[in-house]
């Protein structure tokens, strides 16, 4: 994703309009290819060496923001490593101590080579190895282990998505409507919301459509950086949908002025991620496996259908079926959450699904100030990992079995 200084937007009154590139423009495709040549030859070279080679191509200042942005996206596709014969921080400590001792010798002129040789001798290294490893962990001295190649067309499309993502990480609220999709695609989208642990309300709309209302990272008390990254990573999944529109409220610039951002399927942004279909967050997978191994008397069903309520749609993670009575209880493992959101959903479920739900909320995922609020029956608050036995106990109490 692009850093703030590389984001190119145009202001039209209170609207933000990202300056997307035309994926078919031969000029930008040529620039992308030129940058790719340098990175394809990058394994074994340092970040600083690559940067020096690209200075003439990339340039500095506002006129070269696109070049800098494309280069940054390619750097993100590199895997870097620290190449050193000894931990650099230990070498620096030894070298600085040796240098101080050397300078304290009366009448001795400082000899850098002698200091490095002295440090190397104590560690069974020669002076050249010490020289090479001394600052090997600094950003510009790290070497490229491998580069994930791509096409120029891919890079230009990735740039456009990165611009939109950089805007969304400054959002306070976001609403998107998706229509005309298959049930499988809708389930994929809802599971992506849960995979990224976003605070979201889903409403079923007319015309085979759903509206998703998400909290933006700048609306939260804490976890802003992590949550902002998660909401940006959700965007490529939305781009796989054939018909959607998105509206976001954004706080922009150093003065955090309120702006509006819009994105729709007609804008032509293409997801840079493969369409993997449905996927499961690791903590959800872990809970399912643990529940099946430890709990008797209940059968856990994964990927239940969204539950339509009179005032919206609820997307639980699991459906529990009591083997003796056949009674059903739905379970949701909350991602990021805050008190107001849990309270609102709890009230809805108490009204429409009494005794048929368990909401699991982890204290480490809370985004507002801590307190001793008790939500009531059906809410399980845990510290680190939800315990399957405790979920089963709460489910049994609610269902009366």
Image (tube, helix red, strand yellow):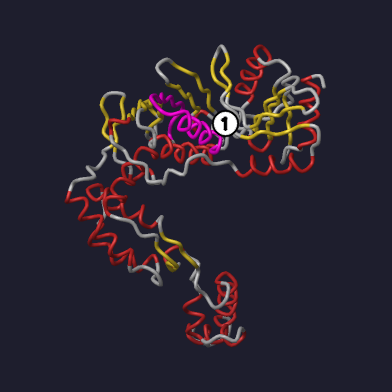
In the image, residue 26 sits, relative to residue 237, either above or below, namely: below
For the residue pair 183 and 350, the one nearer the viewer reads as: 183
**Numbered label tally:** 1
Where residue 143 appears, as percent x and y from the top left, is 43, 68
For the residue pair 93 and 305, the one nearer the viewer reads as: 305
298 left or right of 129 in image: right
| Mark 1 neighbour density, 10 Å: few (under 14) some (14–19) many (20 or more) | few
Residue plotted at (71% across, 15% down): 354
Q: Which residue is mark 1?
A: 221
In the image, residue 396 sits, relative to residue 59, either above or below, namely: above
234 left or right of 398 in image: left
Residue plotted at (47% across, 29% down): 186
373 left or right of 82 in image: right
Disc 1 is placed on an element classified as loop
Q: Would you identify the image quadrant in which residue 92 lies? A: bottom right
Where residue 99 appears, as percent x and y from the top left, is 55, 79
For the residue pair 395 and 88, the one nearer the viewer reads as: 395
Magenta segment range? 170-196
Residue plotted at (63% across, 35% down): 302
């Amino acid at each position: 994703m692009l850093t703030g200084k590389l984001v190119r937007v145009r202001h039209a009154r209170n609207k933000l309009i990202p300056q997307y590139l035309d994926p078919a423009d031969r000029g930008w495709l040529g620039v992308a290819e030129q940058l790719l040549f340098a990175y394809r030859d990058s394994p074994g070279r340092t970040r600083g060496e690559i940067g020096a080679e690209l200075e003439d191509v990339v340039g500095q200042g506002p006129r070269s923001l696109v070049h800098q942005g494309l280069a940054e996206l390619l750097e993100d596709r590199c895997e870097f490593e620290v190449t050193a014969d000894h931990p650099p921080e230990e070498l620096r400590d030894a070298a600085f101590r040796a240098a101080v001792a050397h300078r304290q010798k009366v009448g001795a002129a400082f000899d850098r080579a002698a200091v490095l040789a002295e440090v190397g001798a104590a560690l069974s290294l020669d002076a050249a190895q010490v020289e090479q490893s001394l600052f090997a962990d600094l950003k510009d001295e790290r070497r490229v282990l491998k580069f994930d190649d791509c096409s120029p067309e891919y890079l230009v499309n990735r740039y456009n998505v990165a611009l939109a993502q950089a805007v969304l990480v400054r959002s306070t609220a976001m609403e998107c409507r998706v229509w005309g999709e298959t049930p499988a695609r809708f389930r994929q989208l809802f599971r992506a919301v849960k995979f990224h642990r976003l605070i979201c309300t889903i409403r079923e709309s007319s015309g085979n459509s759903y509206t998703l209302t998400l909290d933006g990272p700048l609306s939260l008390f804490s976890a802003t950086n992590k949550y902002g990254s998660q909401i940006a990573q959700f965007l490529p999944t939305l781009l796989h949908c054939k018909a959607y529109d998105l509206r976001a409220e954004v706080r922009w610039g150093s003065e955090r002025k309120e702006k509006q951002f819009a994105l729709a399927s007609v804008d032509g942004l293409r997801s840079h991620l493969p369409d993997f279909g449905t996927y499961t967050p690791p903590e959800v997978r872990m809970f399912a496996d643990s529940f099946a191994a430890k709990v008797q008397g209940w059968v856990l069903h994964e990927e239940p259908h969204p539950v339509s309520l009179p005032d919206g749609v609820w997307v639980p993670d699991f459906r529990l079926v009591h083997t003796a009575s056949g009674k059903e209880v739905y379970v949701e493992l909350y991602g990021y959450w805050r008190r107001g959101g849990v309270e609102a959903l709890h009230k809805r479920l108490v009204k429409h699904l009494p005794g048929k739900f368990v909401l699991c909320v982890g204290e480490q995922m809370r985004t507002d100030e801590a307190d001793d609020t008790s939500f009531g029956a059906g809410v399980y608050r845990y510290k680190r990992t939800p315990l399957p036995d405790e979920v089963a106990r709460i489910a049994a109490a609610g269902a009366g079995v």
